[in-house]
Image: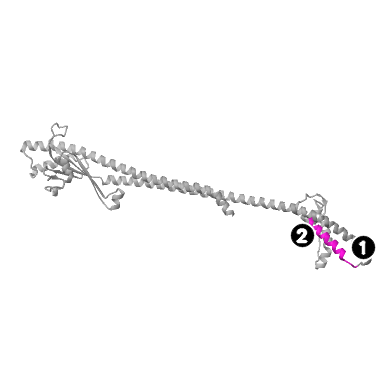
């Protein structure tokens, strides 16, 4: 029953603990969700930056190819033939010099017949119809881009593919005013950017955020458990102490009630007991006149005295008396005890040897209480 009471005391504290732990879990889940959203946002920004970067490259490349290759070759030779080694090498030099400071993995230039006329990978030259729908969109004058990812299912799902490339196709135009690209389409330029490292950096940042959040939540959880344990221990000790004090108070009240009852009963018994003793003394006087050997009255008187002593003890227990301190000698009190018990000691075959110091001083004590205490010990 006590355990149930203690449990009831600790329950509100445990509810706080469960609420706090649940809150930590919800906060951690929210942090993970926010990290995922931030990562998606970062990837979207990276993708948009990649497209903007590709647009800048394509505009610069279009301008350089047209001014440094198309115009000089047309003016000099009247037509462009990339099968001609000199023309190809000149175009290759223009393209590579233009893209020297840019992070571009691959460049392909398609003619109007969807044939690759120039490529960083010479094995692709002459290949046809590799641009897909992006080529069709670019040849009609619009820019097109697509992202290609390679890796395992989990790599793609977690957003950290083994390879991630952004392929952008834009029309190669003949420039009228050199500052604007509004001339006829001469072909399609395709550039490939490797974004794998950027996505892996984003993924590492995401792992760092989640790991840091998990570490912080773990530390908070450990601190919470530590304080909860201490709090539960304090509450449990206080509850036990409160129960112990309550039990002691209940026991004291019970003993007090019992003492009052004993005192009342003792008083009620003492009155008829006094009558029995006085009647037995009168009976002894009358019986001794014609039957001196009759011991029945003596037995009644003795038992009445013993019962009266028992009642006195009960009263003293129920209502302890304050000691009446007077000068007395311990050895005299002990001699009185032994004199009273002499007949019982003799009947039971005991012999008491005493040895008192002649120089024992008087002490301030209640001789009656000392007598009763020594009597209880000796009995």
Q: Residue 99 at what x, y percent from top left?
A: 19, 40
Whether tag 2 and tag 1 are in contact, CB under 8 A, the answer is: no
Residue 377 or 186: which is nearer the viewer? 186
Residue 197 image position (x, y, % from top left): 27, 46
Q: In the structure shown, which secondary structural element does the residue marked by tag 2 occupy?
A: helix
Residue drawn at point x = 52 percent, y = 50 percent: 229
Q: Which residues, given as a range, are shown in magenta?
A: 293-312
Indicate yes or no whether the magenta region holds residue 123.
no
What residue would you read off at disc 1? 286
Task: Read off the residue under disc 2.
Answer: 377
Counting from the top left corner in percent of width and height, residue 329 is at 82, 54
- Helix, strand, or loop for circle 1? helix
* Mark 2 or 1, nearer chain start: 1
- Where's residue 215, x and y in %? 41, 47
The image shows residue 114, relative to residue 293, as above or below, that is: above
Residue at the image point whose x is 81% and y is 59% from the top: 307
**Label placed on residue 116:** none
Task: Locate the N terminus and report the quarter of the image it occupies.
Answer: bottom right
Q: Is residue 223 visible?
A: no
């Amino acid at each position: 029953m006590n355990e149930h009471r203690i449990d009831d005391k600790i329950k509100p504290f445990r509810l706080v603990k469960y609420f706090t732990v649940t809150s930590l879990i919800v906060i951690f889940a929210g942090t993970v969700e926010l990290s995922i959203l931030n990562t998606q946002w970062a990837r979207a920004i990276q993708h948009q930056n990649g497209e903007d970067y590709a647009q800048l490259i394509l505009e610069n490349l279009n301008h350089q190819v047209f001014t440094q290759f198309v115009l000089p070759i047309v003016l000099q030779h009247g037509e462009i033939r990339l099968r001609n080694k000199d023309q190809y090498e000149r175009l290759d030099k223009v393209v590579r010099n233009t893209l020297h400071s840019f992070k571009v993995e691959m460049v392909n230039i398609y003619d109007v017949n969807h044939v690759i006329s120039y490529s960083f990978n010479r094995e692709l030259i002459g290949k046809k119809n590799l641009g897909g729908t992006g080529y069709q969109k670019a040849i009609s004058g619009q820019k097109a881009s697509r992202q290609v990812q390679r890796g395992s299912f989990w790599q793609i799902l977690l957003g950290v593919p083994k390879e991630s490339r952004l392929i952008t196709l834009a029309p190669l135009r003949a420039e009228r005013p050199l500052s604007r690209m509004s001339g006829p389409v001469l072909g399609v330029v395709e550039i490939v950017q490797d974004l794998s490292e950027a996505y892996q950096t984003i993924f590492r940042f995401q792992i760092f955020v989640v790991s840091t959040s998990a570490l912080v939540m773990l530390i908070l959880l450990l601190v919470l458990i530590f304080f909860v344990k201490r709090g539960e221990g304090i509450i449990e000790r206080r509850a036990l102490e409160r129960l112990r004090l309550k039990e002691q108070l209940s026991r004291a009240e019970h003993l007090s009630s019992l003492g009052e009852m004993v005192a009342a009963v003792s008083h009620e018994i003492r009155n008829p007991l006094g009558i029995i003793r006085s009647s037995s003394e009168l009976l002894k006087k009358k019986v001794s006149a014609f039957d001196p050997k009759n011991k029945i009255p003596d037995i009644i008187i003795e038992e009445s005295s013993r019962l009266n002593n028992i009642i006195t003890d009960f009263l003293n227990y129920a209502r302890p008396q304050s000691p009446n301190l007077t000068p007395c000698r311990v050895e005299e009190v002990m001699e009185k005890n032994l004199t009273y018990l002499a007949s019982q000691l003799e009947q039971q075959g005991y012999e008491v040897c005493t040895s008192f110091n002649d120089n024992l001083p008087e002490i301030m004590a209640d001789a009656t209480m000392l007598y009763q205490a020594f009597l209880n010990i000796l009995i």
